[in-house]
Image: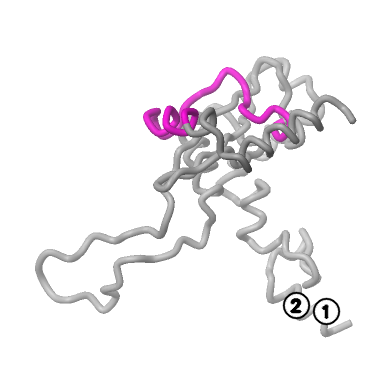
Amino acid sequence: MGAYKYIKQSFEQSYKERGDELKQRISAWRRDGAVVKLSGPTNIARARELGYKAKPGVVVARIKIPKGLSKRPKPVRGRKPSKTGRFYAYAKSLQSRAEERAARKFDNCELLNSYYVGEDGEYKFFEAILVDRTAPTVLSDKQLSQVISQKSRVYRGLSSSGRKHRGIRIRGFGTNQNRPSVRAGRRNIYRN
Protein backbone atom coordinates (compact mmCIF):
# COMPACT_ATOMS: atom_id res chain seq x y z
CA MET A 1 0.00 0.00 0.00
CA GLY A 2 1.12 3.53 -0.75
CA ALA A 3 1.48 6.24 1.87
CA TYR A 4 -1.76 8.00 0.88
CA LYS A 5 -3.75 4.82 1.45
CA TYR A 6 -2.48 4.69 5.06
CA ILE A 7 -3.25 8.40 5.52
CA LYS A 8 -6.78 7.84 4.22
CA GLN A 9 -7.34 4.88 6.57
CA SER A 10 -6.13 6.82 9.62
CA PHE A 11 -8.34 9.79 8.71
CA GLU A 12 -11.41 7.54 8.35
CA GLN A 13 -10.57 5.79 11.63
CA SER A 14 -10.40 9.11 13.50
CA TYR A 15 -13.89 9.99 12.21
CA LYS A 16 -15.29 6.63 13.29
CA GLU A 17 -13.84 6.92 16.80
CA ARG A 18 -14.87 10.62 17.18
CA GLY A 19 -11.86 11.25 19.40
CA ASP A 20 -11.00 14.34 21.43
CA GLU A 21 -8.75 15.69 18.69
CA LEU A 22 -11.61 15.75 16.17
CA LYS A 23 -13.99 17.40 18.66
CA GLN A 24 -11.44 20.13 19.42
CA ARG A 25 -10.83 20.66 15.71
CA ILE A 26 -14.55 21.05 14.95
CA SER A 27 -15.12 23.40 17.90
CA ALA A 28 -12.27 25.57 16.59
CA TRP A 29 -13.79 25.53 13.10
CA ARG A 30 -17.14 26.62 14.54
CA ARG A 31 -15.55 29.82 15.86
CA ASP A 32 -13.99 30.62 12.45
CA GLY A 33 -15.68 32.56 9.69
CA ALA A 34 -17.96 31.13 7.00
CA VAL A 35 -15.15 30.78 4.42
CA VAL A 36 -11.54 30.45 5.62
CA LYS A 37 -8.42 30.14 3.45
CA LEU A 38 -6.12 27.29 4.56
CA SER A 39 -2.41 26.66 4.09
CA GLY A 40 -3.11 23.07 3.01
CA PRO A 41 -5.87 20.45 2.97
CA THR A 42 -6.98 18.71 6.16
CA ASN A 43 -7.46 15.37 4.39
CA ILE A 44 -4.51 15.30 1.98
CA ALA A 45 -5.37 11.87 0.54
CA ARG A 46 -8.90 12.90 -0.45
CA ALA A 47 -7.71 16.24 -1.82
CA ARG A 48 -5.14 14.48 -4.03
CA GLU A 49 -7.85 12.13 -5.33
CA LEU A 50 -9.89 15.17 -6.40
CA GLY A 51 -7.02 16.88 -8.24
CA TYR A 52 -5.21 18.95 -5.58
CA LYS A 53 -1.58 19.81 -6.34
CA ALA A 54 0.74 21.60 -3.93
CA LYS A 55 1.79 24.43 -6.24
CA PRO A 56 1.29 28.19 -6.35
CA GLY A 57 -2.12 29.10 -7.68
CA VAL A 58 -3.98 26.21 -6.02
CA VAL A 59 -5.95 27.38 -2.97
CA VAL A 60 -7.80 25.35 -0.32
CA ALA A 61 -10.69 26.91 1.62
CA ARG A 62 -12.88 25.53 4.40
CA ILE A 63 -16.57 26.42 4.22
CA LYS A 64 -18.99 26.35 7.15
CA ILE A 65 -22.60 25.94 6.08
CA PRO A 66 -25.66 25.63 8.35
CA LYS A 67 -27.49 22.32 8.25
CA GLY A 68 -31.21 21.86 7.78
CA LEU A 69 -33.86 23.32 5.52
CA SER A 70 -34.12 26.98 4.61
CA LYS A 71 -36.49 28.96 6.79
CA ARG A 72 -38.57 31.79 5.42
CA PRO A 73 -39.43 34.70 7.71
CA LYS A 74 -42.96 34.77 9.09
CA PRO A 75 -45.14 37.54 7.60
CA VAL A 76 -45.61 40.37 10.10
CA ARG A 77 -48.60 42.20 8.61
CA GLY A 78 -50.84 42.27 5.57
CA ARG A 79 -52.70 39.38 4.02
CA LYS A 80 -51.86 35.77 4.73
CA PRO A 81 -49.79 34.42 1.82
CA SER A 82 -50.93 31.21 0.13
CA LYS A 83 -47.48 29.67 0.72
CA THR A 84 -47.36 30.04 4.47
CA GLY A 85 -45.10 27.06 5.06
CA ARG A 86 -41.87 28.27 6.57
CA PHE A 87 -39.45 25.43 5.81
CA TYR A 88 -38.44 24.66 2.24
CA ALA A 89 -35.84 22.20 0.99
CA TYR A 90 -33.25 23.44 -1.50
CA ALA A 91 -32.91 21.61 -4.79
CA LYS A 92 -29.13 21.83 -4.33
CA SER A 93 -27.13 19.92 -1.76
CA LEU A 94 -25.26 21.58 1.10
CA GLN A 95 -22.01 20.76 -0.67
CA SER A 96 -23.09 22.60 -3.84
CA ARG A 97 -24.14 25.60 -1.79
CA ALA A 98 -20.78 25.54 0.00
CA GLU A 99 -18.94 25.44 -3.35
CA GLU A 100 -20.86 28.47 -4.60
CA ARG A 101 -20.11 30.33 -1.38
CA ALA A 102 -16.38 29.66 -1.81
CA ALA A 103 -16.49 30.76 -5.47
CA ARG A 104 -18.14 34.06 -4.48
CA LYS A 105 -15.46 34.70 -1.85
CA PHE A 106 -12.53 33.89 -4.16
CA ASP A 107 -13.83 35.49 -7.36
CA ASN A 108 -10.45 35.31 -9.11
CA CYS A 109 -10.44 31.50 -8.76
CA GLU A 110 -12.28 28.65 -10.44
CA LEU A 111 -13.55 25.75 -8.32
CA LEU A 112 -11.90 22.40 -9.01
CA ASN A 113 -13.73 20.18 -6.50
CA SER A 114 -14.75 19.87 -2.83
CA TYR A 115 -15.05 17.25 -0.12
CA TYR A 116 -16.62 16.74 3.31
CA VAL A 117 -14.40 17.20 6.40
CA GLY A 118 -16.79 17.15 9.37
CA GLU A 119 -19.97 18.30 11.03
CA ASP A 120 -21.53 19.12 14.38
CA GLY A 121 -25.15 19.66 15.39
CA GLU A 122 -25.45 23.01 13.63
CA TYR A 123 -22.94 23.13 10.75
CA LYS A 124 -21.40 20.98 8.04
CA PHE A 125 -17.82 21.67 6.99
CA PHE A 126 -16.46 21.22 3.47
CA GLU A 127 -13.09 21.98 1.94
CA ALA A 128 -13.00 23.39 -1.59
CA ILE A 129 -10.04 23.23 -3.95
CA LEU A 130 -9.83 26.41 -6.02
CA VAL A 131 -7.53 27.27 -8.94
CA ASP A 132 -6.24 30.79 -9.64
CA ARG A 133 -6.98 31.84 -13.24
CA THR A 134 -3.89 34.03 -13.63
CA ALA A 135 -1.18 31.91 -11.98
CA PRO A 136 1.55 30.93 -14.50
CA THR A 137 2.08 27.53 -12.86
CA VAL A 138 -1.61 26.75 -13.33
CA LEU A 139 -1.66 27.99 -16.93
CA SER A 140 1.25 25.69 -17.82
CA ASP A 141 -0.39 22.67 -16.12
CA LYS A 142 -2.37 20.58 -18.64
CA GLN A 143 -5.12 19.38 -16.27
CA LEU A 144 -5.65 22.59 -14.30
CA SER A 145 -5.73 24.78 -17.42
CA GLN A 146 -8.80 22.83 -18.61
CA VAL A 147 -10.60 23.82 -15.40
CA ILE A 148 -9.77 27.50 -15.97
CA SER A 149 -11.22 27.39 -19.49
CA GLN A 150 -14.69 26.58 -18.02
CA LYS A 151 -15.79 29.99 -16.78
CA SER A 152 -18.10 30.03 -13.73
CA ARG A 153 -18.32 26.24 -13.77
CA VAL A 154 -19.64 26.01 -10.20
CA TYR A 155 -22.70 28.17 -10.99
CA ARG A 156 -23.48 26.11 -14.10
CA GLY A 157 -23.42 22.84 -12.16
CA LEU A 158 -20.22 21.47 -13.72
CA SER A 159 -18.56 20.41 -10.47
CA SER A 160 -19.04 16.87 -9.17
CA SER A 161 -21.79 17.77 -6.67
CA GLY A 162 -23.38 20.09 -9.25
CA ARG A 163 -23.61 17.25 -11.74
CA LYS A 164 -25.19 15.16 -9.00
CA HIS A 165 -28.05 17.59 -8.29
CA ARG A 166 -28.58 18.03 -12.05
CA GLY A 167 -29.18 14.28 -12.29
CA ILE A 168 -26.22 13.45 -14.54
CA ARG A 169 -24.49 11.14 -12.06
CA ILE A 170 -27.50 8.83 -11.64
CA ARG A 171 -26.59 5.33 -12.78
CA GLY A 172 -28.89 2.84 -14.41
CA PHE A 173 -31.24 5.32 -16.10
CA GLY A 174 -29.28 5.87 -19.30
CA THR A 175 -28.46 9.50 -18.57
CA ASN A 176 -25.27 10.87 -20.06
CA GLN A 177 -23.44 14.16 -20.45
CA ASN A 178 -24.94 14.90 -23.85
CA ARG A 179 -28.49 14.91 -22.51
CA PRO A 180 -28.54 16.18 -18.89
CA SER A 181 -32.19 15.39 -18.24
CA VAL A 182 -33.24 12.53 -16.00
CA ARG A 183 -36.60 12.05 -17.75
CA ALA A 184 -35.01 12.11 -21.21
CA GLY A 185 -32.53 9.48 -20.10
CA ARG A 186 -35.28 7.23 -18.78
CA ARG A 187 -37.26 7.59 -22.03
CA ASN A 188 -34.17 6.55 -24.02
CA ILE A 189 -34.07 3.22 -22.16
CA TYR A 190 -37.61 2.31 -23.16
CA ARG A 191 -37.13 3.36 -26.81
CA ASN A 192 -34.28 0.88 -27.36
The residue that appears at 51% across and 31% down in the rendered structure is 20
114 vs 53: above or below:
below
Taking 137 as reference, is 36 left or right? left
The residue that appears at 73% across and 16% down in the rendered structure is 137
Q: Farthest bottom residue?
A: 190
For the magenta stretch, what is the residue range? 24-47
Q: Label 2 amino acid? A: Arg
x and y percentages locating residue 135 in the rendered image: 65, 18
Q: What colouring does the structure picture have?
A: one colour
Taking 132 as reference, is 173 left or right? right
Q: Answer few, some or many: residues within 10 Å of disc 2's Cα (few below 14, many 20 plus, some between 14 and 19).
A: some
110 vs 86: above or below:
above
Residues marked 1 and 2 touching at CB (< 8 Å): yes
Residue 186, labelled with which disc?
A: 2
The residue that appears at 64% across and 19% down in the rendered structure is 57
- Quadrant in the rendering for residue 165: bottom right
x and y percentages locating residue 73 in the rendered image: 23, 60
The residue that appears at 69% across and 76% down in the rendered structure is 183
Asked whether 36 falls inside the magenta stretch, the response is yes
Asked whether 85 falls inside the magenta stretch, the response is no
Q: Label 1 amino acid? A: Ile
x and y percentages locating residue 61 in the rendered image: 54, 29
Q: For this rendering, which residue is in front, 9 or 67?
A: 9
The residue pinned by badge 1 equals 189
